[in-house]
Image: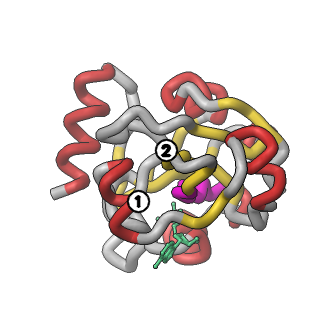
């Protein structure tokens, strides 16, 4: 199971991250915010795009809509949403559970600046019913992301 791969990555990294399962589901940002009981903006969407021919991951606040032009400026044009199979091959996880780090290939990660203003945020943990809480600074470290205005 993908959650086990993510759990293994967390353990190997000594991340201090604890995954929480929600039987009611966390497949979308709205689902996740409802399950956790946090603001929609505190949910980290891990969106897979293809930019200049290579997969990239954009970590976007659940309250924001990513501006593909902004992503293109930092990741390279043209930008298009990855299809489900491309997203899975690049990250090792299916859409709805893609985590912000611990991917099976070295995918460049870009992080929405708006996530930084929250004390903690919640991100997908490899499955559509599992998320974890993390401080934005730690998320930045573990994902090795570039912070940008993405909305
Ligand atoms: N677990 C939740 C909250 S952490 C989650 O993963 N949300 S998400 O926003 O990061 O992932 C769902 C996103 O995947 C959608 O917002 C949408 O942008 C994208 N998506 C959904 N279906 C497809 C599809 N068929 N092809 C490509 N992208 C898709």
Colour basis: secondary structure
In the image, what residue occupies the spot 68% across and 41% down? 75
Q: Is residue 96 left or right of residue 31?
A: left
Query: With respect to residue 73, does 65 lie above or below?
Result: below
Label at residue 100: 2
Label at residue 87: 1
**Magenta residue span:** 42-49
Alpha-carbon span between mark 1 and mark 2 = 12 Å
Query: With respect to residue 37, does 1 lie above or below?
Result: above
CA neighbours of label 2 inside 10 A, class few (<14), some (14 to 19), many (20+) = many
Query: Ligand 1 within 8 A of label 1's CB?
Result: yes
| Nearest to the observer: residue 5 or residue 39 | 5
In the image, what residue occupies the spot 62% across and 47% down? 52
Tell me if residue 21 can be seen. no
Quadrant of the drawing holding the C terminus: bottom right
Considering only order in the chain, which callout, 2 or 1, is on the residue closer to the N terminus? 1
In terms of secondary structure, what is the magenta stretch mainly?
Answer: strand
Secondary structure at badge 1 equals: helix
Query: Ligand 1 within 8 A of label 2's CB?
Result: no
Secondary structure at badge 2 equals: loop
CA neighbours of label 1 inside 10 A, class few (<14), some (14 to 19), many (20+) = many
* Residue 123 x, y percent position in the rendering: 51, 51
Judge depth for marks 1 and 2 and give the one in front: 1
Q: Is residue 114 left or right of residue 127?
A: right
Label at residue 39: none
């Amino acid at each position: 199971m993908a959650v086990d791969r993510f759990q293994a990555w967390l353990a190997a990294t000594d991340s201090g991250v604890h995954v929480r399962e929600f039987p009611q589901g966390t497949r979308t940002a709205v689902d996740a915010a409802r399950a956790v009981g946090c603001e929609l903006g505190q949910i980290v969407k891990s969106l897979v795009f293809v930019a200049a021919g290579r997969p990239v991951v954009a970590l976007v606040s659940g309250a924001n809509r990513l501006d593909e032009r902004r992503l293109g400026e930092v990741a390279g044009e043209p930008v298009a949403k990855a299809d489900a199979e491309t997203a899975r091959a690049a990250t090792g996880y299916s859409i709805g559970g893609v985590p912000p780090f611990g991917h099976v290939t070295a995918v460049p990660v870009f992080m929405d600046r708006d996530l930084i203003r929250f004390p903690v945020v919640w991100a997908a943990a490899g499955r559509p019913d599992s998320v974890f809480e993390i401080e934005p600074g730690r998320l930045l470290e573990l994902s090795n992301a570039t912070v940008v205005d993405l909305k």
